[in-house]
Amino acid sequence: MLDSAFPITFAAVRKKNVVLENVPVTAYAAEGKALARHDGKVIFIEGGVVPGDVVDVRLSKNKKDWAEGKAVHFHSYSDKRVAPFCQHFGTCGGCKWQMLPYSQQLTYKQQQVADHLQRIGKLVLPPMEPILGSVHTEHYRNKLEFTFSNKAYLTNEEVKALNGEIPVRPALGFHVPKLFDKVLNIDTCYLMQEPVNLIRNTIREYAVTHGLTFYDIRAQQGWLRNLVIRLCTTGEIMVNLVIHHEDKENRIALLDHLLKTVPAITTALYTINPKGNDSIFDLEPKTYFGKGYAEEKLEDFVFKIGPKSFFQTNTYQGEVLYKVTRDFAGLTGSEIVYDLYCGTGSIGIFVSRNARKVVGIELIKEAIDDARENAARNNVTNATFFAGDVVDICDDAFFAHHGQPDVVITDPPRAGMHEKLVNKLLEIAAPKIVYVSCNPATQARDLALLDALYTVEKVQPVDMFPHTHHIENVVLLKKRVNN
Ligand SMILES: C[S@@+](CC[C@H](N)C(=O)[O-])C[C@H]1O[C@@H](n2cnc3c(N)ncnc32)[C@H](O)[C@@H]1O
């Protein structure tokens, strides 16, 4: 069937820059790319394509078994498509799946988890639990970072209309994908509740009318660099304005104007960043107004979140994810639980009342400082946290000193666990491992190694990021009895 839809020979397909015509898109692959097949060859397709569309694809990579390209023409659209709700859809890098109904997004995410675990992990799976969708499909984030730039993104039509005379054009919004120096001016973003749009637009309007300079990332000049807004479910709002250098008069005037316009802000900070990159992790934010941090709640645990702290970006689904993790761990109060890649210790603290002891390990020292402080604030006395690389820390002496784990909870970054750590876990052979992952592909790779000793008992995908291709997945592994 598919062959007749490809009026092109296999030899031609091996060339780059070939345009494949009338390609029926059948599924989604990893990283939000769409997928089609021809002659046993897999074609990954970018460019806002969804399964059910029929497109022409210009190939940019062309290997023996697979190719990659961009949709350059749509012959027909999937009947599953819906109208995107955001005016910035198509240019902005966020919320790229708005053209699919949410129920359909969940179906594709569920399929992808199953596909990765079976194809990469080659695992025998128990019946998978249906993905837990987000109650809030808009306004679900608790933090966003906007960028100032003196090069607002312009469409091709806008550039043509300017006849080569392109002026400095201040923008405050999001980077346009693949254009590192262009920023899309955002008017309304649906990722966070109000007053986040009001805060961003107030600052931009004030800055433009008062002639404040927006950063030029190429020339490394300009005053205003980034704006980080955190809005907690407790109602607290923390704003961190990142500027290139101190300009006390303008800084005070701008922040005072903001606080007067948006009195709901509970904390305002500013950070001076004279560096070539945007990271603030090696900088010291200064408090201008309020207590200098915000508080977020998960169940009745309260977490202190400073301007540099990491916290799950969807608080509602973060709580769902942690409940699944705690349920999978099946704690009775007598267990020693290791929380690997613990960040600010939030999973460990969340399960602490159900465990005898929690041992958390995390690379970033500041996150461990937060974990210790959050444990103390929540009267958690049975959790200890250690800063360092899990691979180095988790040696025999460490386990001998802190106790053999009854349950290991592991929540690594997208790259998954280091093979040395997987081997160590096989050696330590805890009865249960709960593996929380934001990348089912690397999770599947690690599970394939753990398969030497463990059986996958439960699989629960959780959707933390509606309208994106990102998936969180929790897997319960139990040690086989005969091992
Ligand atoms: C997905 S986050 C998990 C955070 C935490 N479990 C939570 O729910 O907030 C992964 C964490 O692993 C940490 N990390 C990355 N590589 C590490 C390593 N080699 N050793 C220890 N921690 C590491 C990162 O700093 C990050 O905090």
Image: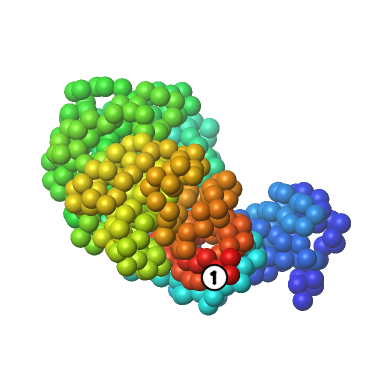
Q: Tell me the residue at 27%/31% (across/down).
A: 285
Frontmost residue, 467 versus 88: 467
Tell me if I can see residue 286 in this picture: yes
Q: Position of residue 26 (x, y in %)?
A: 64, 70
* Quarter of the N terminus within the rendering: bottom right
Q: Which corner quadrant of the image does residue 167 belong to? A: top left
Task: Count the labels in the image.
Answer: 1
Q: Is residue 142 left or right of residue 109?
A: left
Q: Is residue 447 left or right of residue 475?
A: right
In the depicted structure, whether residue 469 falls above or below residue 168? below
For mark 1, what is the residue?
481
Q: Which corner quadrant of the image does residue 172 belong to? A: top left
Q: Position of residue 479 (x, y in %)?
A: 52, 65
Q: Tell me the residue at 58%/70% (across/down).
A: 482
Q: Tell me the residue at 35%/61% (across/down).
A: 335
Q: Is residue 51 left or right of residue 311?
A: right
* Quarter of the C terminus within the rendering: bottom right
Local crowd size for mark 1, using a 10 Å CA cut-off: few (<14), some (14–19), many (≥20): few
In the depicted structure, whether residue 289 falls above or below residue 458? above
Q: Position of residue 160 (x, y in %)?
A: 53, 40
Frontmost residue, 85 versus 326: 326
Tell me if I can see residue 162 in this picture: no
Q: Which corner quadrant of the image does residue 316 belong to? A: bottom left
Frontmost residue, 391 versus 24: 391
Mark 1 CB lies closer than 8 A to ligand 1: no
What sort of colour scheme is used for the picture? rainbow
Q: Tell me the residue at 44%/47% (across/down).
A: 399
In this view, the residue farthest toward the front is: 400
Q: Position of residue 281 (x, y in %)?
A: 36, 33
Q: Amino acid at mark 1?
A: Val
SS assignment at label 1: loop
Frontmost residue, 227 versus 283: 283
